[in-house]
Image: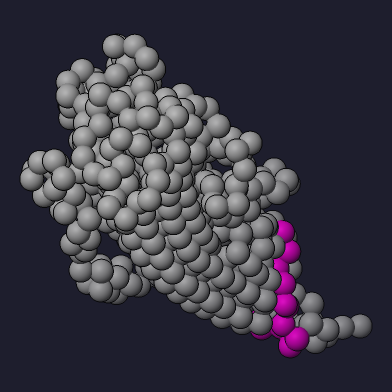
Amino acid sequence: MENLEIDLTIDDGALEIDLDLESGAPNYLAMLMHGNLTTINDTVTERASSIPSYAFYSKESIKEVNLQDAEEIGPYAFHKTNIEKLDIPNVTTVGEYAFSYITVSDEDGVLFLPKVENDCVESSWAFGYATAPKIVAPEYIGRSGLGAFNDGKAQKLILPKAKIAAGLQNMKELVTLYLPAATECSHRYSQNGAVRSSSNGVSSCNKLVNLVLPEVTNGGSGYLATSCPMLVNAYLPKLKNYAVRSNGNATIFNSCSTLRQISLPSLTNLVIDETSGTTYSYAGTIASNCPNLERIFLPNLEQAAFTNVYSGCPKIDGIFLPSLKRRWQKSATAPVIATTSRDGDFILYTPKLEEWTGYIIYSSASKINNFSWVIGNQESTTTALLLSQIWQESTSYKPYGEINLYVPDHLVDDYKNATNWSKYASYFKPQSEMPQELLDRIEYELTPPEEPDWDAIIEEAWS
């Protein structure tokens, strides 16, 4: 018969249990206890390597958890517990909802997960709804995304090795999200036993001010940031591809009402790339419903399928794409200028354009007054291909005021006679006649915007 030693201590109605079982059986007697159980202290000779699902589900009286040798925590194992001290130094895998609704109230207010990797799709909401001012997971990789921390109340989330910058939602207190190792913005997650995929990065984080993703190079379909009303600074210096060959439309920033400028200095491909065919039907938007957005800096965007570079951003009065070679849309009527969010003058700048499909304007609700489009430069040898109309041939759809299509001096006549361009012959002017005001505006827009002090932002986020 196995040797079982049980130490029971009763202090003012609180019960502590220490087990010493030579066979190495885990401390599962605690699962049978109800009421005043306060401490789980695993002192088994051969300690348990895993805690099963629902082991201590809703045992709100548990105050201290000490599992020195446990490596795996099953789903819902500590769901709805209030813990003053959590010591799980060797746990690497945590199941979904394992610590959801947990309240950590130790003296530092830190939920410390020293070896948790959560590198599995089943980790969704593993720490969901957690109440802890600070969550630190130095080994968290999370190739399935950040869903393990959804709905939590942490002000600081420290994940130096997280690979995926996606799937985080409803962290209402988080101010800065800094993921120095993340390279992707798409993820998989588990829901009701099924594995699903999504590419939303960060959503509904009401106090998020800074989104710092220095190594992200690729983004999936969906939103990079959506419904983050306090977002001011977004740092993605290496983002090169967004939603390339995705399975749906994509918007990088959505409903970020405080956002004033967007700088994506490395973005090269949006939805399409140079190999995409004309049957590809999805589209991208840089920003939508960002009412205070004033500037979008896209110096290297070459290939794009966009329905509106922006939508619901009334302060944007120009789109400057100095590297754009190809703008494509399956629908020839898909506009660049949003149908209801633009009232005033507008500038479009595409000096390296080779091919264009889709309207500029396709709605009488877009009240564009004076419209200027700079097409090509002095190094251009031929006219760009126009595979659609610029606007519907109706006075209610074209700009109300002056229209100027500025093309290289040596190609003015070619544009006036080129296929699809010829109907706009009366609007062509040589680029040598561009007014100084327009030249100054172009120079300003091609100057990189001033960046905030990222080092100070990161230091504050991780202090």
Which residue ends up furthest to the left in the rendered image? 436
Query: Residue 361: horizontal and vertical position, in percent?
Result: 34, 25
Count of numbered circles on the image: 0
Snapshot quadrant of residue 263: bottom left
The structure residue drawn at horizontal position 22% and vertical position 55%, both measured from the top left corner, is: 446
Image coordinates of residue 369 in percent, x first then y, are: 18, 23
Residue 332 image offset from top left, x and y in percent: 49, 27
The verdict on residue 463 being magenta is no
Residue 343 in view, yes or no: no
Identified at 45% across, 42% down, the residue is 355
Residue visible at 56% across and 37% down in the picture: 282
Q: Which residues are magenta?
A: 40-53
Q: Quadrant of residue 277?
A: top right
Instruction: Say which quadrant the N terminus sits in.
Output: bottom right
Q: Position of residue 292 (x, y in %)?
A: 21, 39
Tell me if 22 is positioned left or right of 8 in this view: right
Q: Is residue 47 magenta?
A: yes
- Is the magenta region chiefly helix, strand or loop? loop
Question: The C terminus lies in which quarter of the figure?
Answer: bottom left
Query: Residue 123 versus residue 347: which sits nearer the camera?
Result: 347
* Residue depicted at x 79% and y 82%: 24
**48 relative position to 151: left or right:** right
Is 113 situated above or below 213?
Answer: below
